[in-house]
Image: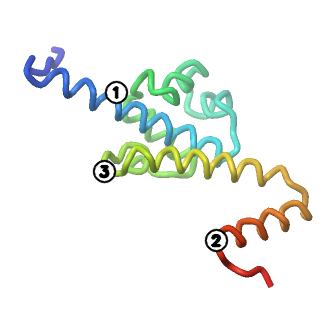
Amino acid sequence: MDYHAPRSHAPGMIKELEQLKKRIGYRVKAARKAANITQAQLASDVSKSVEAISNIERGQSLAPIDTLFAISRVLGTTLVHLVDDQEAFQNSRKEEAQAALAASIRNLDEDQTRLAMRLVESIRGESGS
C-alpha cells in the first residue's frame, strides 16, 4: 500500500523531499571525490548501475536506505552524514569544494604539495616559517 501525503501538506513535503535529494546527492558526490573514486567504481562496489549513482549525485533519485548505507561504507563516511537534515545546504557545497581541492592536491608532486600547503597556511593567516 502506497502512502500519499494529505493534499494540504503535499506541496511542502514535495519541496522538502527535493531539497533532501539534492543535499544527499551533493554529499555523496563530495565524499566520492574525496575518496578519489569514479562513479563506475562506486557503482560496482555497491552493486548499482553508473546511471543510478549519477541520478543520486544529481539529486534526481533518492536511493533506498540500504544503498545509502553501502555507499557511506565504501566512501568512508557515515549514513548520518549523508542524510542529516539539520546541516545547511551550503555546507554540502563547501564539502564539494573541499573534496575537489583534496582530489586536486593528490595529483601534485612533492614540491607542488609543499607550495599548496604554504598557500593554504597563508590564506588561513598562519605562518609557515
Displayed quadrant of residue 123 = bottom right
Q: What's the amino acid at mark 1?
A: Glu
| Residue depth check, mark 2 versus mark 1: number of the one nearer the observer | 2
Is residue 30 depicted above or below 77 in this figure?
A: above
Q: Crowding near pointer 2: few (<14 within 10 Å), some, many (20+)?
A: few
Label 1 and label 3: CA atoms lie apart by 15 Å
Which SS class for mark 3? loop
Give me the residue at 61% from left, 47% from top. 97
Q: What's the amino acid at mark 2?
A: Arg
Q: Earlier in the sequence, mark 3 or mark 2?
A: 3
Q: Label 2 belongs to which residue?
A: 124
Q: Going by the picture, which residue comes out furthest to the top? A: 1
Displayed quadrant of residue 112 = bottom right
Give me the residue at 72% from left, 48% from top. 103
Q: Earlier in the sequence, mark 1 or mark 3?
A: 1
Q: What's the amino acid at mark 3?
A: Gln
Does the CB distance between marks 1 and 3 fall below 8 Å? no
Give me the residue at 48% from left, 45% from top. 92
Which SS class for mark 1? helix
Q: Label 3 belongs to which residue?
A: 86
Q: Crowding near pointer 1: few (<14 within 10 Å), some, many (20+)?
A: some
| Residue depth check, mark 3 versus mark 2: number of the one nearer the observer | 2
Residue 121 position within the rendered picture, expressed as x and y whole percent measured from the top left: 71, 72
Which SS class for mark 2? helix
Give me the residue at 42% from left, 50% from top. 81
Q: Label 1 belongs to which residue?
A: 18
Left or right of 20 on screen, residue 74: right
